[in-house]
Amino acid sequence: MPTWLCRSKGPEGEFLRSAGIDKRWVTSSGYMSCVSTTGKYLGDMASAKVLEEFRKLPEADRKPGASAVPDLDPSERLIPSPPAGGLVVKVHARFLTRGDRGEVRYAKVDDFPLMGGGPEAVRRFQKFLEPNTEYMWLTEQEWKSLVPANPVKGERATVAPAIVERIARFHLTPRRSMTSEGHGLGKKDVKTAGLTLVIDDVSADRIRFGLEGFIHTGAAYDEAKATSPNGPLGFGYETALHGILEYDRTKGAFVRFDLAAPGDVWGRWPDANGKTLFAERPGRTPFAFAFELARGDSPADRIPPGGNGAYVAERTGYFSAP
């Protein structure tokens, strides 16, 4: 839960504070706050005492509907919702490693010189290297701009700069793998960015597109400066883009939005104090992204870009044209 939301004025902040959630976190290891329907903090889900505390509650507090939570007025909503009629794309990010023969595999703790310690540290770092997921939003006007009125097989079209810049600045950002929250890159960080749609096939009920492109953000790669830790080379990332999109003409909707970015990352991974982070590796190393259409059958599919959309979707020009 974003810290700023827990501290905010209004119904959302008041509810979170009354339940004590502003003082606790939810993590992949199961450290989760358990709260009754009336907002009473019962303990952490990892604790066996939670069920015992729940059984002690009056029956009225244990039944659904014990507390009525009114719908928020649109003016009271602090976390934005996906744009009306828009498209939500799930974005996965993962550290990879290139083997001695050039093969690519999932990264392990041993591949990072700065990851060390006892068994507990290794277990924690290995979880960190699992895929990280967030979400990209396209407005209705934007995704409709990808669909030609009179499609012809073999036709090529340039993807709108606003969409390409959004992908480059807010989603192809390896440092976001450290956390799903946070803002994106600045406009000046985008050195090269382009995407082209190619119509691969057209039928009465479907259009199939190929998507190809290239994006480079941050510093240029210099092998002599790509050292670790505390190397002098600035952070950089570049990747080719390969995708397949399918549009259902009868439904008037995209039914497939697959995009792969098998890129390389290099340079410093500094924290807020400029200190080298444990994710830093020497040289140029693989880091990949994969995009897929969110089906909308999970509440998680409504999570804003950047994890707490007040920073990304509303305050950093997420929907602004370049």
Image (tube, grey):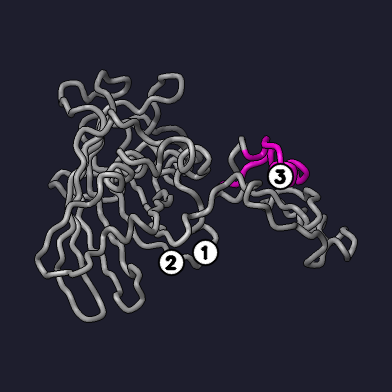
Q: Give percent across and percent down for residue 231.
A: 27, 20
Instruction: Characterize the local packing of mark 1: few (<14), some (14-19) or many (20 or more) Cα atoms within 10 angstroms.
Output: few
- In the drawing, does residue 175 fall left or right of residue 59? left
Q: Position of residue 256 (x, y in %)?
A: 31, 67
The magenta segment is 5-27
- Most frequent secondary structure within the magenta stretch: helix
First in residue order: circle 1 vs circle 3: 3
Check disc 2 and report the residue beneath it.
295
Residue type beneath disc 2: Arg
Describe residue 224's horizontal placement relative to residue 139 as left or right: left
As drawn, the residue found furthest toward the bottom would be 204
Label 1, secondary structure: give it.
Answer: loop
Disc 2 secondary structure class: loop
Q: Judge the density around disc 3: few (<14), some (14-19), many (≥20) Cα neighbours within 10 Å.
A: some
Residue behind mark 1: 298
**Residue lying furthest front:** 149
Label 2 vs label 1: CA separation?
Answer: 8 Å
Q: Which residue is disc 3 drawn over?
A: 16
Q: Secondary structure at mark 3?
A: helix
Asked whether the beta carbons under mark 1 and mark 3 sit within 8 Å of each other, the answer is no
Between 159 and 241, the one lying in front of the other is 159
* Percent position of residue 138, x then y: 38, 54
Report if residue 110 is visible in the image: no
- Name which quarter of the figure residue 144 lies in: bottom left
Task: Depth check: give the residue in front, 222 or 322.
Answer: 322
For the residue marked with disc 3, what is the amino acid?
Leu
Compared with residue 250, is residue 264 higher up or lower down, i.e. above or below? Answer: above
Label pair 2/1, CB-CB below 8 angstroms: yes
